[in-house]
Image (tube, rainbow, N blue to C red):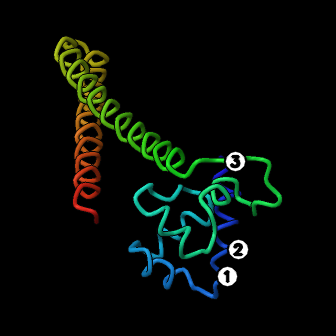
C-alpha cells in the first residue's frame, strides 16, 4: 500500500463529490485535520471508518487501497480482508508504542542506578548528572508513550 498514492486518490474522489475536507470529515465522524493527514499520505484511514469513507467517496475498498480506479488496477481484494489487515496493522503500531514505553522506563531505571554509582571526581560527578538527566528524560518519555497508547486505545473502544 502506498500511503501517498492512497492520499491523492482520496483527494481526487473527494473533489469529484464536490466535498471540502470539513464536509467529508463531518460525514464520517472525524476531524478535517484527519482528512488532511490522509490526503497528504501522513497516515492511513482507521479501519473503523474506512468502509464509510468508501461509501462517501463512491469507491470500493479495493480501489482505495490501490489508489486508483478498478479498470486501471490489476489487484483484487476482499473487503473483509482489507479491513482486518488495517485493524492488525493499527494494533501492531499500538503494541510497538507500548513496548517502547516500557523499554524507556526500564532504561531510565538502569540509568538512575548507574548515575548513583558515579561520584568522587568532577568528571564522575558530571557523568552522574548527565545520566540522572537521561534517566528522568527516559522515564518521562516512556510514561508519556504508555499514557498516549492507553488513551488512544480507550478512545477507539468508545468510538471517539
The reply to whether dot 1 and dot 3 touch (C-beta < 8 Å) is no
Residue contact at pointers 2 and 1, CB within 8 angstroms: yes
Q: Residue furthest right?
A: 72
Please tell me whether mark 3 or mark 2 is closer to you in this view.
Answer: 3
Q: Specify the quadrant of the image occupied by residue 16.
A: bottom right
| Crowd tier of the residue under label 3, counting other residues whose Cα lies within 10 Å: few below 14, some 14–19, many 20 or above | few
Q: Residue at x 49, y 63 (%)?
A: 51
Question: Dot 1 corresponds to which residue?
Answer: 15
In the rendered structure, which disc, 1 or 3, sits on the residue that comes first in sequence? 1
When the figure is inspected, residue 8 is found, relative to residue 132, above or below; the finding is below
Find disc 3 in the rendering and name its residue. Answer: 76
Which residue shows up at 28% across the image and 46% down it? 149
Give the spatial CA distance, label 1 vs label 3: 25 Å
Residue identified by numbered label 2: 12
Q: CA distance from mark 3 to mark 2?
A: 21 Å
Q: Position of residue 49 (x, y in %)?
A: 43, 63
Amino acid at each position: 500500500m502506498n500511503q501517498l498514492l492512497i492520499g491523492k486518490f482520496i483527494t481526487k474522489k473527494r473533489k469529484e463529490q464536490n466535498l471540502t475536507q470539513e464536509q467529508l470529515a463531518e460525514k464520517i465522524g472525524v476531524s478535517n485535520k484527519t482528512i488532511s493527514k490522509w490526503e497528504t499520505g501522513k497516515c492511513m484511514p482507521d479501519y473503523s471508518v474506512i468502509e464509510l469513507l468508501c461509501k462517501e467517496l463512491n469507491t470500493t475498498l479495493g480501489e482505495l487501497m490501490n489508489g486508483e480506479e478498478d479498470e486501471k488496477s490489476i489487484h483484487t481484494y476482499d473487503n473483509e480482508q482489507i479491513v482486518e489487515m488495517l485493524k492488525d496493522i493499527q494494533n501492531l503500531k499500538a503494541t510497538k508504542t507500548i513496548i517502547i514505553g516500557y523499554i524507556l522506563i526500564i532504561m531510565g531505571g538502569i540509568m538512575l542506578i548507574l548515575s548513583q554509582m558515579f561520584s568522587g571526581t568532577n568528571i564522575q560527578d558530571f557523568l552522574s548528572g548527565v545520566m540522572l538527566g537521561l534517566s528522568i528524560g527516559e522515564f518521562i518519555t516512556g510514561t508519556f508513550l504508555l499514557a498516549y497508547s492507553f488513551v488512544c486505545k480507550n478512545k477507539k473502544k468508545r468510538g471517539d
